[in-house]
Image: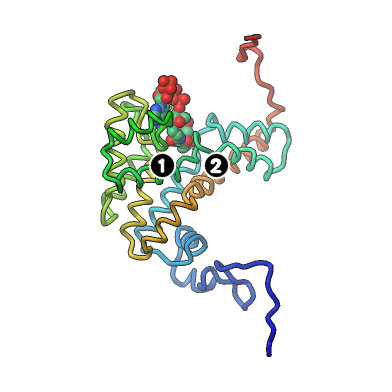
Amino acid sequence: GKVRAPTHVVSTICDDRGEEPTYAGVNMTTLFERDYGVGDVLALLWWKRSLPAYCTKFIEMCVMLCADHGPCVSGAHNTIVAARAGKDLVSCLTSGLLTVGPRFGGAVDDAARCFKAARDANLSPHLFVESMKKKGLRVPGIGHRIKSRDNRDSRVLLLQQYARAHFPQVRYLDYAVAVEDYTLSKAANLVLNVDGCIGALFLDLLASCAMFQAHEIDEIVDIGYLNGLFVLARSIGLIGHTFDQKRLKQPLYRHPWEDVLYTKV
Ligand code: ACO
Ligand code: LMR
């Protein structure tokens, strides 16, 4: 009989062997015939399925709204320093991306995990926040360096507005906002940030879109797909910062002595 040689790689999201490459079975011609956008392509390559327009539009909003947040944030700063050191595009980009983590841009998955676990367990926002405090943990998705109760993050407001108008339900967002109500009673900068808002709204998207079964939602939250949205989005801005510095022919960056406290303690 036939003996099938074992393969060393398994791949399930795309195929480039035929006349036309396919993403989750959808060929390039079809992508354009159906007027698919980046959100549709992302859904095909990340989840191997087409999603309804309200979901792909939301994904595209996340990418557009998180593409950049100025030159002073960790990622852009690293990229700018690398560009000014004469590094190539990929080095500048990855230098910035390496700052994405639990404090900056990489709190989306943990926010989703925490909001899901707390809401599904019927934990009141008050008890949830206090239980995190007892464990010595910051609530992922809450807090911002420059945004506050009186200086709201318009990205968060736009995402909320969209979801309230287009999602069948927003129960995780409502929970996150109730958490924010409580944290704001403690300090004005403990707002629901863009990571937290995307984390909560993605839970709502997954829970309300019939395309995902319960075990798949658990798997997505477990594996942690959602920081990928920030990484994808911010790469656009970081590449922009790289070209900006190169176009401006900026010299090697050296941090000023005056801005360093030299001390032996
Ligand atoms: N949960 C509970 N308490 C918090 C939180 C939080 N998420 N954030 C700040 N605090 C507390 C701090 O513990 C601090 O109190 P302490 O000094 O007694 O410990 C107090 O509020 C003041 O903190 P700040 O110095 O104002 O906070 P900082 O500017 O250092 O941090 C940051 C901002 C990193 C965003 C922080 O709020 C945080 O860690 N949040 C959780 C992670 C997160 O969501 N990151 C994504 C931010 S959005 C983005 O990057 C795109
Ligand atoms: C960002 O999107 O980079 C931020 O929210 C972080 C910041 O400090 O502005």
In the rendered image, the vertical position of residue 128 relative to residue 64, given as above or below: above
The image quarter in which residue 207 lies: bottom left
Q: Is residue 143 visible?
A: no
Name which residue lies at 31% across and 34% down.
180
The quarter in which the C terminus is drawn is top right
Name which residue lies at 61% across and 39% down.
98
Residue hosting label 1:
111
Ligand 1 contact, mark 1 (Cβ < 8 Å)? yes
Q: Position of residue 66 (x, y in %)?
A: 46, 43
In the rendered image, the vertical position of residue 32 relative to residue 155, given as above or below: below
Q: Is residue 219 visible?
A: yes
Dot 1 falls on a residue whose secondary structure is helix
Of all residues, the one furthest to the top in this rendering is 264
How many badges with numbers are in the image?
A: 2
The quarter in which the N terminus is drawn is bottom right
Amino acid carrying mark 2 in the image:
Gly
For the residues marked 1 and 2, what is the alpha-carbon distance in whole angstroms?
23 Å
Q: Residue 237 has which mark?
A: 2
Q: Quadrant of ligand 1?
A: top left
Q: Give the mark, 1 or 2, whose residue is nearer the N terminus.
A: 1
Q: Position of residue 44 (x, y in %)?
A: 49, 64
Q: How is the image coloured?
A: rainbow
Amino acid carrying mark 1 in the image:
Ala
Question: Circle 1: is it few (<14), some (14-19), or many (20+) Cα within 10 Å?
Answer: many
Q: Position of residue 123 (x, y in %)?
A: 28, 41
Front-most of 257 and 188?
A: 188
